[in-house]
Image (cartoon, coloured by chain):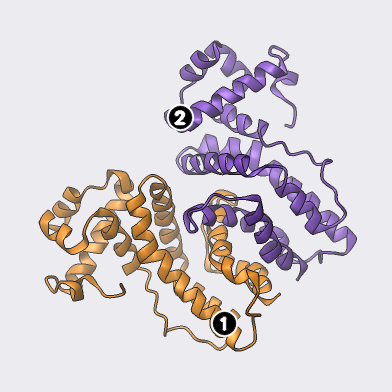
Chain colours: A orange, B purple
């Protein structure tokens, strides 16, 4: 599941794959998910539709993996020795500009996912599950260190808390999420709930 | 702001107002916000469009107030004497069926609000601000009783935490929100963060 398209079928280079994902994200920003067609992706990237379908199966997986490509989840990269340190390190993987772009894309896709079951499935496989797995590893290490009680019910709600921060920030506060905001929310909400 | 359309212009009865709001919500469920027209509301409710515009100003306010009408926020109704009691009482104002319907409507409107500034303004005035004001009263009473520290930074994030529960429940867990889920989330996340 974590392998790239190039390892699955060694037809395109990593550079070509990155270029293609970039074009998919540009199109997604321009026209949204529902109006994005494989024809447009093929034209923009000078690929054949057959290649796109062979390599990615369809629009949903192509889009989910294009976003995943820009949002690397590397389980071994973060291990600061404390729960707070790990969460703050995750926050600092994206600068404010990337965070805002990412949040805007996720809003577009979150919306589209309500009416596109195959998109929801692809988002789960390529974005939600890897993020949840990473959160679980971070929290498990905190449990192992004795920072978090193994039976703390907030362990099941880490992603709920964090998604709330992003959604409410844009909808209620009408401001883009920033590193400073997310860091403050983690200190005010996520760490206290997990430390209870 | 809290007055009803009938007190603003005494042209329609409360029964007629309730009937009209019901029709607006039915239409909203059937066609979504963007395809909902004042013509359709006028036809469905056998009203004149002039009356609708005179009474509600426009589609955004009509829709926001239709939802508000089904989601009463009565500041004096809840005061159990404890933070947990007040939150649990708020959770129990809607049964699971109402909660699911409400959550589905808010998802439709949250999406539409991203591209309709006048809808966002109406949602803020008729739904978000009253909910935030009620949360602030509940939390302020807890501060006055000494249950919550006045400088606890989680006070600013109560609505963020709760919105996260609803959004993640439908998108990640793929299950409707229920009283039991919301109650468990409040105990696991909201109360510990506010009690830190």
Q: Which residue is mark 1?
A: A85
Q: Let me know if marks 1 and 2 both belong to one chain.
A: no
Residue occupying the point 57% across, 30% down: B63
Residue B6 location, quadrant: top right
Q: Is residue B56 left or right of residue B150?
A: left
B191 versus B114 height, above or below: below
**Percent x, y for residue B146?**
88, 64
Q: Nearer the viewer, residue B139 or B191?
A: B191
Helix, strand or loop status at disc 2: helix
Chain letter behind tag 1: A
Is residue B47 something one can see in this rendering?
A: yes
Gap between marks 1 and 2, in whole Å? 47 Å
B118 versus A187 height, above or below: above
**Percent x, y for residue B128?**
64, 43
Q: Which residue is mark 2?
A: B30
The quarter in which the N terminus of chain B is drawn is top right
| Proximity of marks 1 and 2: CB atoms separated by less than 8 Å | no
Count neighbours of disc 2 (C-alpha within 10 A) and say few if under 14, some if 14 to 19, many if 20 or more: few
The quarter in which the C terminus of chain B is drawn is bottom right
Q: Nearer the viewer, residue A192 or A18?
A: A192
Count neighbours of disc 1 (C-alpha within 10 A) and say few if under 14, some if 14 to 19, many if 20 or more: few
B162 versus A86 height, above or below: above
Residue occupying the point 59% across, 29% down: B61
Q: Number of callouts in the render? A: 2
Q: Is residue A161 left or right of residue B29?
A: right
**Percent x, y for residue B178?**
61, 50
Residue A50 location, quadrant: bottom left
Is residue B58 something one can see in this rendering?
A: no
């Amino acid at each position: 599941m974590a392998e790239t398209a190039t390892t699955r079928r060694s037809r395109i280079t990593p550079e070509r794959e990155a270029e293609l994902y970039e074009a998919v994200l540009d199109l997604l920003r321009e026209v949204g998910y529902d109006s994005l067609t494989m024809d447009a992706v093929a034209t923009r990237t000078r690929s054949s539709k057959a290649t796109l379908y062979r390599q990615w199966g369809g629009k949903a997986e192509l889009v989910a993996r294009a976003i995943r490509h820009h949002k690397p989840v590397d389980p071994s990269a973060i291990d600061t020795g404390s729960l707070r340190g790990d969460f703050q390190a995750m926050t600092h993987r994206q600068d404010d500009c990337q965070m805002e772009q990412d949040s805007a894309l996720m809003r577009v896709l979150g919306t589209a996912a309500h009416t596109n079951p195959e998109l929801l499935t692809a988002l789960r496989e390529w974005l939600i599950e890897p993020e949840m797995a990473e959160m679980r590893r971070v929290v498990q290490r905190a449990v192992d260190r004795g920072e978090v009680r193994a039976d703390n019910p907030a362990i099941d709600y880490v992603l709920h808390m964090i998604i709330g921060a992003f959604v409410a920030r844009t909808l209620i506060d009408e401001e883009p999420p920033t590193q400073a905001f997310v860091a403050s929310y983690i200190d005010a909400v996520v760490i206290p709930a997990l430390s209870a």
